């Protein structure tokens, strides 16, 4: 009997567990979250959340040791909590296990990717892959198909996961730039905030310019860290724009829209701490990031939103390419 484990019972994590349990990846799925998590309590008490109902082959545990019995573990928690989880995981025997990281963000203030956090904190022989690309739980539960990308520095790990998880609902592509796919996936959340601000200001026409210029900026950031700038035009970044810059389900876009209107948003928007991390490292390394700089000024320094966002597009005259 094949089993897959999941750490993190939020919206995305619970869906990934449901997907693995219902689309042939596993006969049983073990799911873990901290016992005090509202998401975990809801699933434990009702066997459902706002998006789906757990199938009979999905099992909830409040013991981390229990889910670590399986060889493949999908992780989907808030990026700012990941280092703490890794430190907890490091006390267990993880030799030979495969971790698929489904989070999209950078740690703040270190500006560290999830992959590098895991490598820093866990000094055991484990296999690590990352998941990126478009897709919303609400659409998937309606049977709307999409694509995603899985990447790893181990071809065998990448191949194993893609063949295991692919279905008619999600087609997984083989990633070819582990650095670029991680950074691109993280920064698409930041660009989602910018799109939401444009929605909140009702400056919808500028979204096209944002979509044209953002991959150039993100590609510059990717290239600085040794990735391929062209990865910004792949599934992990540009390919995720519809789901992040336009969808009403996008937490990052909704945060930006409410922020522009002076309203609060009480759900997790990973782009907010990622924006801070990007700003810190761009300043330190001298990377030209005008969109992120403008967003930082508006979100963290309370600069006038309209003037700041307008300035983002009013730079010195220059050639497009």
Image (tube, rainbow, N blue to C red):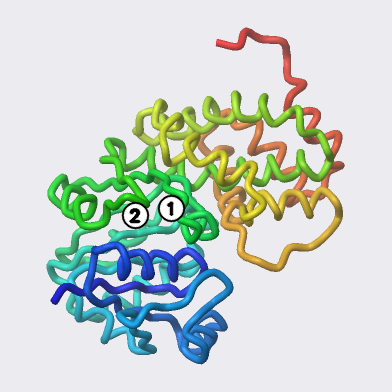
Residue drawn at 30 percent across, 60 percent down: 100
Q: Are marks 1 and 2 in contact (CB under 8 Å)?
A: yes
Toward the viewer: 6 or 166?
Answer: 166
Residue drawn at 37 percent across, 52 percent down: 169
Q: Circle 2 sits on which residue?
A: 116
In percent of width and height, residue 94 lies at 19, 73
Whether residue 316 sits left or right of residue 236 in the image: it is right
Toward the viewer: 93 or 168?
Answer: 168
Residue drawn at 31 percent across, 37 percent down: 177
Whether residue 21 sits left or right of residue 81 in the image: it is left
Q: Which mark is residue 136?
A: none
In percent of width and height, residue 299 lies at 74, 50
In percent of width and height, residue 171 lies at 32, 45
Report how far apart the C-alphas of labels 1 and 2 lie in the structure. Answer: 6 Å
**Relative height, residue 129 to residue 44 (above, below):** above
Disc 1 is placed on an element classified as: strand
Q: Residues within 10 Å of mark 1 (few under 14, many from 20)?
A: some
Disc 2 is placed on an element classified as: helix
In percent of width and height, residue 43 lies at 49, 83
Determine the image quadrant of residue 264: bottom right
Image quarter hosting the C terminus: top right
Q: Circle 1 sits on which residue?
A: 112
Determine the image quadrant of residue 196: top right
Toward the viewer: 18 or 113?
Answer: 18
Whether residue 231 sits left or right of residue 212 in the image: it is left
């Amino acid at each position: 009997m094949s089993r897959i484990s999941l750490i993190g019972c939020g919206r995305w994590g619970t869906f990934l567990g449901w997907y693995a349990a219902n689309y042939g990846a596993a006969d049983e799925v073990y799911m873990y979250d901290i016992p005090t998590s509202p998401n975990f309590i809801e699933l434990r008490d009702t066997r459902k959340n706002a998006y789906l109902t757990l199938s009979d082959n999905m099992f909830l545990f409040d013991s981390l040791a229990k889910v670590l019995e399986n060889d493949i573990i999908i992780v989907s928690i808030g990026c700012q909590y990941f280092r703490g989880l890794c430190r907890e995981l490091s006390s267990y025997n993880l030799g030979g296990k495969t971790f698929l990281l489904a989070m999209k963000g950078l740690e703040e203030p270190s500006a560290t990717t999830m992959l590098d956090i895991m490598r820093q904190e866990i000094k055991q022989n484990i296999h690590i892959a990352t998941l990126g690309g478009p897709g919303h739980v609400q659409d998937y539960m309606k049977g709307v198909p999409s694509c995603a990308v899985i990447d790893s520095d181990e071809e065998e790990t990448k191949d194993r996961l893609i063949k295991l998880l692919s279905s008619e609902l999600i087609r997984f592509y083989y990633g070819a730039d582990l650095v670029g796919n991680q950074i691109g996936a993280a920064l698409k959340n930041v660009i989602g905030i910018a799109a939401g601000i444009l929605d909140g200001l009702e400056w919808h026409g500028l979204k096209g310019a944002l979509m044209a210029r953002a991959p150039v900026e993100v590609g510059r950031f990717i290239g600085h860290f040794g990735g391929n700038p062209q990865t910004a035009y792949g599934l992990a970044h540009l390919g995720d724009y519809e789901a992040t810059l336009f969808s009403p389900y996008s937490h990052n876009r909704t945060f930006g829209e409410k922020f522009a209107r002076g309203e609060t948003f009480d759900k997790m928007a990973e782009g907010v701490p990622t924006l801070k991390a990007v700003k810190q490292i761009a300043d330190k390394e001298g990377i030209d990031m005008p969109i992120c700089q403008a967003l930082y000024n508006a979100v963290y320094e309370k600069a006038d939103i309209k003037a700041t966002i307008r300035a983002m597009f009013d730079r010195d005259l220059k050639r497009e390419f």
